[in-house]
Image (cartoon, helix red, strand yellow):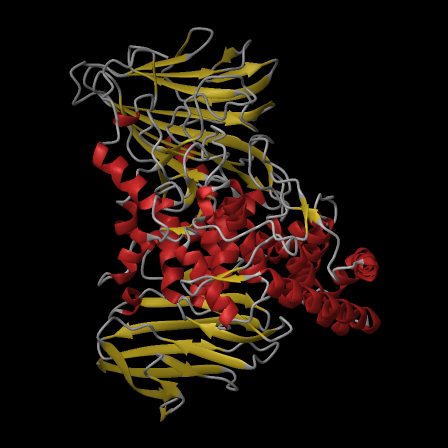
């Protein structure tokens, strides 16, 4: 669309290409290790500077079914959830400001053009300002652009509901400013893809149904609305694009109505966020990402993505359900778990285990026995099926299942077996507590039998390596999966890296055990991580955006960080948080695809993603942040036993004058709130211990800035001696109610 001769070429310099490829060639996370060993530790700025931003979602040409956007730039999905069921209508706002597309990537669209050379807004990415969000986190896209003639534009757009129509409405505000340009006038074109529209006042109608409203001053040529500024003057244009043509009551579109709609948007989403947990940490960007990702996932609900062919249920979403439940959005958790009972799977044993774990997690957070009763018949059938499989099995394991969606070979998969075992262990105490004691006993017997066989199979299949690490194959018993020197050197190794975390997070290896330590060492020494992200390489190169070069697939990072938290890998958790924020999502707009490139691709300055937005990928960041602040420990049977507070916070977060606040985090023991306020020489802590179930253990860790140590602790004004300066940990086990502590600090 128009000439690009005045668009500066954006190319990756040779030093960047060499540095990234060199880091990817290493078996260790060399950049991550450098940050961990630095004086400051990992930071957003340090990680952000390592890689070019994520921006692309595929070529802007090609057949409509394969094209995501016409510009090749990612979009943000905006809409309004229908209760806990997610979006009922969507508009996709392309992040370069070029288009708003209704409902899905092939829907009707409004295209924004600028200048007198038929240029699309955002067409030259070198002249596009970094996209951002209103107030840093609310779902309203903010962009700036300079056209080929030097005219400056700013644009803001969002989608909301208004009383004048039943359609979702996307509001757009564009400021056209030619005052610093060589040409005297600026031009704006708004072009609907819908034909047959007729202008009626300041509306475009189709058979008396409104498709678009706009502010005065436009000329309509039958295809586009055309605006032109006066010479040397700034012009502000407002437009409202309806996701579907609807009868609409009169609406004067101007600054007042636009700002009224934006206030309504902010009020709605702030109200929804207030229904869940509230986290405040000393970094606004982290707070903004957390709030926006919750907004995104409330819109997704049980959908893997929005607006494209991935807008469907995926089994990765059971992990997301648990994350949303922890943040207090138990309606979303229930909607996802319920959807799992309505979907079949090529992994029947894994699916049954995940249904059990999802149900148990929801019950522990809500006490909703009626939901347990409603799904128990289906889960009872799964227990019976497991009993029959084990009775018929020569190996003592459940029947082989397909390795994965992309690897269809049936195997005795450690991930599948471990998820089934975890589900049985999770549901047994739930059934005991909800009036199903016989079923609880059956589930325990089946779990005991499966665990004995699984531990024997793991021991027979595992290999200790000369570097002190332990390789545990996903494919058990047949000897086909041998240690990978680098996991991403082959297809099998890459998929091992994706699915092994399911087994690790299940607790199959007790935290701190030689096996858990050995597997962690294997991951760190054999190419599993890059800047704290989950490495993946498509073999052979499939040429898809997000996969056409070595990169990351952080859908599976959620279970990695659970394993890291279980094994007190605080620094690795911090690295994952900043790695995701700085390299694994789009800057300022917090969008992720299923997979993202890291390695350079010829001809592409920006990195690419596969079918964003992705709700399971969002869960990785949310779970990492939660685990840094609130981690539940488990007993030998996998039942929640204790709470660890602030065990993995960045040390900079406890510098004097900084504060951490956690309110209404929903744990297995009830609602948890606490605050930590750092001052020079002391730290004030307040903890509201959960009331519903007393945790067996309750510990607080204060990761002080380097060079500082605890010197004394007072609880309620009295000396308190249950603390260990060497581990920076205070033991609050057995205490109830509200705890007020003052921790004295000093050099050390």
**Could you say which is closer to the camera, residue 351 or residue 454?**
454
**Could you say which is closer to the camera, residue 161 or residue 574?**
574
For residue 432, what is the image quadrant?
Answer: bottom right
Residue 516 picture location, percent across and down: 50, 67
- Residue 617 visible? The answer is yes
Residue depicted at 40% across the width and 62% down the height:
467
Q: Quadrant of the C terminus?
A: bottom left
**Could you say which is closer to the camera, residue 45 or residue 386?**
386
Judged left or right of residue 352, residue 103 is: left
For residue 601, what is the image quadrant?
Answer: top left
Residue depicted at 53% across the width and 49% down the height:
498
Q: Quadrant of the N terminus?
A: top left
Residue 523 picture location, percent across and down: 44, 57
Judged left or right of residue 382, residue 165 is: left
**Could you say which is closer to the camera, residue 291 or residue 702?**
702
Residue 260 picture location, percent across and down: 43, 38
Residue depicted at 50% across the width and 21% down the height:
109
For residue 334, what is the image quadrant?
Answer: bottom right
Residue 727 picture location, percent across and down: 36, 79
Work out whether 352 lies above or below 433. above
Most extreme residue toward the top is 221
- Residue 42 visible? The answer is no
């Amino acid at each position: 669309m128009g000439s690009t001769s005045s668009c500066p070429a954006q190319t990756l310099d040779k030093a960047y290409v060499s540095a990234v490829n060199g880091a990817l060639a290493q078996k260790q996370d060399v950049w991550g290790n450098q940050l961990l060993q630095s004086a400051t530790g990992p930071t957003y700025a340090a990680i952000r500077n390592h890689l070019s931003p994520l921006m692309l979602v595929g070529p802007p040409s090609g057949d409509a079914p394969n094209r995501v956007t016409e510009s090749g730039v990612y979009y943000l999905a905006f809409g309004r959830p229908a209760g806990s069921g997610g979006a009922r209508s969507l508009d996709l706002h392309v992040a370069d400001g070029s288009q708003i597309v209704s409902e899905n990537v092939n829907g009707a669209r409004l295209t924004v053009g600028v200048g007198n050379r038929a240029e699309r807004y955002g067409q030259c990415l070198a002249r596009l300002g970094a996209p951002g969000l209103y107030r840093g986190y609310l779902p309203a896209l903010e962009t700036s652009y300079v056209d080929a003639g030097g005219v400056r534009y700013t644009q803001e757009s969002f989608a909301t509901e208004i009383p004048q129509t039943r359609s979702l409405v996307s509001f757009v505000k564009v400021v056209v400013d030619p005052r610093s340009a060589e040409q005297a006038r600026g031009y704006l074109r708004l072009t609907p893809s819908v034909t047959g529209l007729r202008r009626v006042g300041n509306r475009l109608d189709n058979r008396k149904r409104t498709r678009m409203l706009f502010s005065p001053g436009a000329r309509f040529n039958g295809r586009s609305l055309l605006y032109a500024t006066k010479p040397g003057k700034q012009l502000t244009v407002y437009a409202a694009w309806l996701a579907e043509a609807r009868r609409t009551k009169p609406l004067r579109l101007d600054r007042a109505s636009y700002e009224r709609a934006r206030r309504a948007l902010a009020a709605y989403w702030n109200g929804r966020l207030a229904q869940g947990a509230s986290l405040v940490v000393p970094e606004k960007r982290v707070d903004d990402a957390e709030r926006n990702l919750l907004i995104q996932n409330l819109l997704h609900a049980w959908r893997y993505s929005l607006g494209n062919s991935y807008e469907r249920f995926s089994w990765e979403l059971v992990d997301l359900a648990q994350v949303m439940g922890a943040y207090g959005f138990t309606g979303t958790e229930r909607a996802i778990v319920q959807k799992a009972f309505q979907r079949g799977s090529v992994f029947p044993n894994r699916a049954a285990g995940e249904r059990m774990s999802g149900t148990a997690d929801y019950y522990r957070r809500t006490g909703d026995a009626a939901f347990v009763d409603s799904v128990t018949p289906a889960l009872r059938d799964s227990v019976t099926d497991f009993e029959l499989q084990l009775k018929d099995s020569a190996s003592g394991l459940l029947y082989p299942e397909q390795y994965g969606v992309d690897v269809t070979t049936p195997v005795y998969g450690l991930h599948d077996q471990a998820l089934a075992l975890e589900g049985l262990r999770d549901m047994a105490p739930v059934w005991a507590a909800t009036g199903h004691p016989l079923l609880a006993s059956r589930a325990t017997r089946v779990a005991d039998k499966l665990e004995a066989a699984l531990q024997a199979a793991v021991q027979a299949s595992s290999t200790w390596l000369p570097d002190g690490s332990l390789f545990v194959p996903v494919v058990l018993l047949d000897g086909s999966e041998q240690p990978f020197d680098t996991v991403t050197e082959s297809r099998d190794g890459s998929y091992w890296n994706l699915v092994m975390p399911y087994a690790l997070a299940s607790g199959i290896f007790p935290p701190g055990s030689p096996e858990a330590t050995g597997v962690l060492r294997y991951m760190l020494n054999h190419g599993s991580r890059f800047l704290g992200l989950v490495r993946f390489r498509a073999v052979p190169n499939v040429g898809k955006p997000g996969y056409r070069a070595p990169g990351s697939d952080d859908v599976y990072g959620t279970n990695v960080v659970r394993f890291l938290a279980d094994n007190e890998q605080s620094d690795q958790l911090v690295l994952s948080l900043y790695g995701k924020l700085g390299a694994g999502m789009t800057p300022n707009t917090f969008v992720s695809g299923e997979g993202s490139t890291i390695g350079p691709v010829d001809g592409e300055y920006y990195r690419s993603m596969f079918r964003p937005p992705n709700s399971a990928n969002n869960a990785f960041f949310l779970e990492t942040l939660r685990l840094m602040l609130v981690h539940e420990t488990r007993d030998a049977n996998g039942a929640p036993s204790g709470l660890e507070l602030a065990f993995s916070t960045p040390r900079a977060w406890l510098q004097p004058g900084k504060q951490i606040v956690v309110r209404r985090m929903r744990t297995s023991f009830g609602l948890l709130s606490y605050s930590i306020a750092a001052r020079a020489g002391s730290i004030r802590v307040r903890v509201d211990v959960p009331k519903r179930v007393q945790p067996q253990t309750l510990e607080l860790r204060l990761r002080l800035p380097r060079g500082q140590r605890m010197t004394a602790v007072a609880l309620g004004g009295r000396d308190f001696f249950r603390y260990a300066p060497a581990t920076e940990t205070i033991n609050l086990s057995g205490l109830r109610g509200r705890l007020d502590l003052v921790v004295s600090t000093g050099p050390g």
